[in-house]
């Protein structure tokens, strides 16, 4: 282990190797064709490939020569693998003593015990010492061509001023702080300021309604909220402060609201409100980092499950940071000096791991994208790629599906020669979108990675890369597990199955980036992820494993739907709809949507004596969902039916509803448990009529 090569030396060696050949062309080209001609099953081991150049830390495993061997050792001997990586890649105040102490049966996940560090120091100070003027953030503001660059030195100072401001108003180690902001340098500084003083941030996506914000803030018992006077998106103003004003009326734990200024417009400032920039101007530009234990909480992020209210997924310090930074480097082939762009909002896990923590830990220049793919026109992304000289572009299939509807000239007129890696995340990418992204955007030469992961996994778990350059990539497939990840497939009865099969996707052993608990409800954590298949982490997704051992995600196995890459429980929408006094029963299911991937389809039963017409109620229901959850959660379709299909024990048979709307009513499967089978004909008729009325369906 003492024989670790210096990073600089390895990087130079790697550069030489890369210059000496044109990476992987034949296989990539083959992958883009409709007929794939890849060498099935094997990783072609190129003679020039050097595992120690690929991952300098692998020098600790002198016996390892190939990518496959490195992958194997990461799974077979995770303690050594992760132990070496944690020691080499993170800056510690005190080294850890125990690599891991995990027990899935108790939902116990601990990594790097005994170690102490500060995440903000890893993301900022270490780079400021080496190259203070390197650009940390490029804030791609809503209005194209008005980007703002922030160096590591500036980001450290901003973070420290914000941290001192929080401290001045009583925010302490362990306190929870909600961040309700659109994508901006101050939002990143707010996350890092919490990390610096040991407070726990919970970022709430700025598209969520006041009621959703209340639910999260109260569950987390947040002491403070950091927000902006207004947000700006696609030329529109979003009244963030006004939404916070409405929310805090119902948030007794909130003592202060820090208000940053994104626009020059004045907003009402009340008793709780503190003008953030003004306070920061007065604050000390240096702030001693709090010394944190590896397993202290770093942040929580609320995400939807199949039942109940969104749950606060907890991530801790060292393991999360290591996993985010390692996946960022290897999945995207990040090299120092690259401009990395993940267009996700910081309100989602993708923004946490691949806009903020992964890239900053690696000393990257990371782009903060404030706008939308169509603003001011469908060329926005690619004009930005040209202007900012972006090397890696990571986005969602929903945006790709939207953009491919426009002329290719919106892409082609911009120079995309800097691009090397393209990534897709959050939902299945269909073949048409994959091919367009690969061929039109990536000019058949960029590596395109379909990355599968979850809020709970902390970082990418299955992705075509890392692997040796040139190894095959199959379109629209996540394919290979990342280092240390051991995916398995189980039958519904919990039997582990080998070979080419489909079933429940589970992960068989812990990895440092995985969630530690659900805030305030560890039992729910155990029940949700470790009970269904004892001994395994259950992802909630189904998957198919090919003959070659590649994984294809087939979609959720529970009542979670994915609208434009945003995860949502159908139960949450049903709960919102149930608020309507004239709607005693509802059932919501996912419905395939050309652009959004999935949309919500609501079946509702009306009270017999309702005074409103159906269209009025449908509109009222939509606005209830927008105000209780968020606009994106609003069902595209609300169909009034007389009854819902129920079993004799009163359970709604959603499976039948799904068959009705996907035109599979010819094959309804077993309906013997239905209380009254004539209900299906009734619903089919209602649906046919609805379709005729809305000829667009
Ligand atoms: C889905 C987003 C297919 C999946 C990072 C997962 C995907 C859920 C992919 C997690 C992919 C994510 N292919 N499905 N490449 N990536 N998903 O927590 O159903 O917002 O369980 O995390 O998105 O969504 P979350």
Image (cartoon, rainbow, N blue to C red):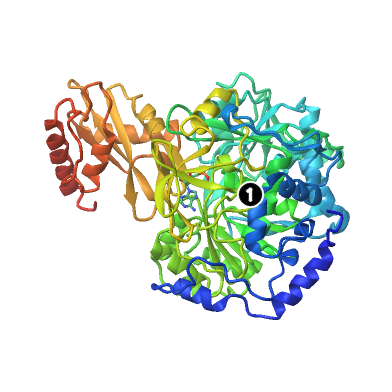
Where residue 359 sits: x, y (%)? 69, 54
Q: Quadrant of residue 586?
A: top left
Where residue 674 sits: x, y (%)? 19, 28
- Crowdedness near tag 1: few (<14), some (14–19) or many (≥20) residues, C-alpha within 10 Å: many
Residue at horizontal 41%, vertical 55%? Answer: 500
Q: Is residue 370 visible?
A: yes
Q: Nearer the viewer, residue 209 or 272?
A: 209
On screen, 46 above or below 599?
Answer: below
Residue at horizontal 18%, vertical 20%? Answer: 609
Where residue 619 sits: x, y (%)? 30, 36
Q: Nearer the viewer, residue 28 or 38?
A: 38
Residue at horizontal 50%, vertical 61%? Answer: 376
Q: Quadrant of residue 79?
A: top right
Indicate yes or no: mark 1 CB to ligand 1 under 8 Å. Answer: no
On screen, 236 above or below 491?
Answer: below
On screen, 15 above or below 248?
Answer: below
Question: Extreme top residue here?
Answer: 252
Q: What residue does disc 1 label?
A: 75
Q: How many marks?
A: 1
């Amino acid at each position: 282990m003492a024989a670790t090569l210096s990073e600089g030396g390895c990087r130079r060696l790697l550069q030489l190797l890369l210059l000496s050949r044109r990476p992987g062309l034949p296989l990539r080209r083959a992958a883009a064709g409709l007929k794939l001609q890849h060498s099935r099953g094997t990783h072609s081991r190129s003679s020039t490939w050097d595992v120690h150049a690929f991952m300098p830390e692998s020098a600790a495993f002198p016996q390892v020569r190939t990518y496959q061997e490195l992958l194997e050792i990461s799974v077979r001997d995770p303690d050594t693998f992760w132990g070496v990586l944690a020691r080499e890649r993170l800056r510690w105040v005190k080294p850890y003593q125990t690599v891991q102490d995990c027990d899935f049966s108790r939902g116990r996940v601990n990594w790097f015990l005994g170690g102490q560090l500060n995440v903000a120091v890893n993301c900022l100070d270490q780079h400021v010492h080496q190259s203070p003027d390197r650009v940390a953030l490029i804030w791609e503001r809503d209005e194209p061509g008005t980007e703002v660059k922030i160096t590591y030195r500036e980001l450290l100072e901003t973070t420290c001023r914000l941290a001192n401001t929080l401290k001045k108003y009583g925010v302490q180690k362990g306190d929870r702080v909600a961040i309700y902001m659109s994508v901006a340098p101050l939002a990143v500084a707010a996350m890092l300021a919490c990390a610096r003083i040991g407070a726990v941030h919970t970022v709430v996506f700025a598209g969520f309604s006041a009621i959703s914000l209340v639910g999260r803030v109260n569950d987390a018992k947040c002491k403070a909220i950091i927000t902006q006077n207004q947000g700006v998106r696609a030329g529109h103003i979003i009244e963030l402060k006004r939404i916070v004003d409405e929310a805090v009326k119902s948030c007794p734990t909130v003592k202060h609201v820090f208000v940053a200024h994104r626009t020059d417009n004045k907003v009402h400032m009340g008793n709780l409100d503190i003008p953030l920039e003004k306070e920061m101007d007065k604050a000390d530009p240096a702030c001693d980092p709090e010394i944190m234990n590896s397993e202290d909480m770093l942040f929580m992020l609320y995400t939807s499950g199949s039942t109940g209210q969104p749950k606060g997924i907890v991530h801790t310090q060292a393991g999360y940071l290591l996993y985010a930074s390692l996946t960022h480097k290897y999945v995207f082939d990040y090299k120092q000096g690259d401009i990395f762009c993940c267009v996700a909002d910081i309100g989602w896990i993708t923004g946490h791991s691949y806009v903020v923590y992964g890239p900053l830990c690696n000393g990257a220049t990371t782009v903060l994208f404030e706008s939308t793919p169509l603003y001011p026109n469908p060329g926005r992304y690619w004009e930005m790629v040209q202007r900012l000289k972006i090397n890696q572009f990571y986005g969602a299939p929903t945006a790709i599906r939207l953009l491919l509807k426009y002329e290719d000239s919106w892409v082609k007129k911009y120079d995309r020669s800097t691009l090397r890696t393209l990534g897709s995340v959050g939902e299945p990418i269909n073949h048409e979108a994959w091919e367009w992204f690969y061929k039109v955007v990536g000019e058949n030469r960029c590596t395109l990675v379909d990355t599968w992961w979850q809020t709970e996994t902390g970082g990418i778990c299955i992705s075509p890369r890392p692997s040796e350059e040139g190894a095959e990539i199959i379109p629209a497939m996540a394919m290979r597990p990342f280092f240390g990840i051991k995916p398995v497939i189980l039958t519904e009865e919990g039997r582990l199955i080998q070979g080419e099969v489909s079933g429940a996707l589970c992960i068989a052993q812990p990895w440092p980036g995985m969630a530690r608990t659900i805030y305030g409800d560890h039992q729910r954590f155990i029940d949700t992820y470790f009970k269904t298949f004892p001994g395994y982490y259950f992802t909630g997704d189904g998957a198919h494993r090919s003959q070659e051992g590649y994984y294809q995600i087939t979609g959720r196995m529970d009542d979670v739907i994915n609208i434009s890459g945003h995860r949502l429980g159908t139960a949450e929408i049903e709960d919102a709809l149930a608020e309507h006094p004239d709607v005693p029963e509802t059932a919501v299911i996912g419905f395939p949507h050309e652009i959004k991937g999935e949309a919500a389809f609501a079946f509702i039963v009306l009270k017999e004596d309702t005074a409103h017409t159906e269209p009025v109620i449908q509109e009222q229901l939509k606005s209830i969902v927008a105000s209780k959850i968020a606009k994106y959660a609003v069902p595209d379709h609300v169909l009034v039916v007389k009854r819902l299909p129920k079993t004799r024990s009163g359970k709604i048979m959603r499976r039948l509803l799904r068959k009705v709307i996907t035109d599979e009513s010819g094959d309804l499967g077993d309906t013997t448990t239905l209380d009254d089978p004539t209900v299906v004909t009734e619903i089919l008729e209602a649906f046919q009529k609805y379709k005729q009325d809305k000829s667009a369906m």
